[in-house]
């Protein structure tokens, strides 16, 4: 798996952009609508952050993540992003996933 960088920028509450940088040309993160038809967000525990957590993990893993995993990722990582921009690497997310499994949190 090649290294990716996920960058989010909030221009205003209704204008949020999340891109995936892998190589030279960044692309928008795919939005697989389930929780928030309005799109992604972060910094709290609502539907926009759930959507972001789900889609970030989906992009990284190549398949839809289980609910417990992306809800845990939302609570521990996405809700903690309190600025108008964030940057997460695929390595950081993979480390979180490994820790999640080691803690047995996938059953939570």
Image (tube, grey):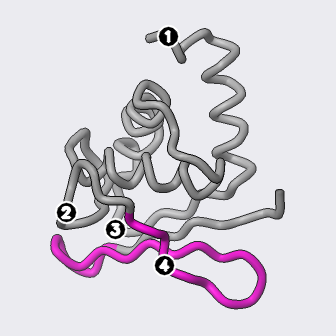
Query: Tags 3 and 4 in contact by the CB under 8 Å rule?
Result: no
Q: Is residue 62 above or below residue 105?
A: below
Mark sitting earlier along the chain (3/4)? 4
Query: What label sits on residue 107 in the rendered view?
Result: 1
Q: Residue 39: where, in percent of width, then height?
A: 26, 65
Residue at coordinates 67% horizontally, 90% vertically from top-left?
25
Q: Is residue 1 above or below residue 25?
A: above
- Of the residues tagged 3 and 4, which is closer to the observer? 4
Residue 37, label in figure:
2
Tell me the residue that label 4 is attached to. 28
Quadrant of the rendering where the C terminus is positioned? top left
Q: Is residue 33 left or right of residue 9?
A: left
Quarter of the image where one finds residue 21: bottom right
Image coords of residue 15 (percent x, y): 23, 79
**Label 4 crowd bin: few (<14), some (14–19), many (20+), radius 10 Å:** few
Mark 4 vs 1, N-terminal side: 4
Q: Residue 26 magenta-drawn?
A: yes
- Magenta residues, as a range? 10-31
Q: Quadrant of residue 104?
A: top right
Element under disc 4: strand
- Of badges 3 and 2, the one in the foreground is 2
| Residue ID for mark 3 | 84
Report the Cα–Cα distance between label 2 and label 4: 16 Å
Mark 3 → mark 4, Cα distance in angstroms: 17 Å
Q: Secondary structure at mark 2?
A: loop
Residue 10: where, in percent of width, then height? 31, 73
Which numbered disc flags the more N-terminal residue, 3 or 2? 2
């Amino acid at each position: 798996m090649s290294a990716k960088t996920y960058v989010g920028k909030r221009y205003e509450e209704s204008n949020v952009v999340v891109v995936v940088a892998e190589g030279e040309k960044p692309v928008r993160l795919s939005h697989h609508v389930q929780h928030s038809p309005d799109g992604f967000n972060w910094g709290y525990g609502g539907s926009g952050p759930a959507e972001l957590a789900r889609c970030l993990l989906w992009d990284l893993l190549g398949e839809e993540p289980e609910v417990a995993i992306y809800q845990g990722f939302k609570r521990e990582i996405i809700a903690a992003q309190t600025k108008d921009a964030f940057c997460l690497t695929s390595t950081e997310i993979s480390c979180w996933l490994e820790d999640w499994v080691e803690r047995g949190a996938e059953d939570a």
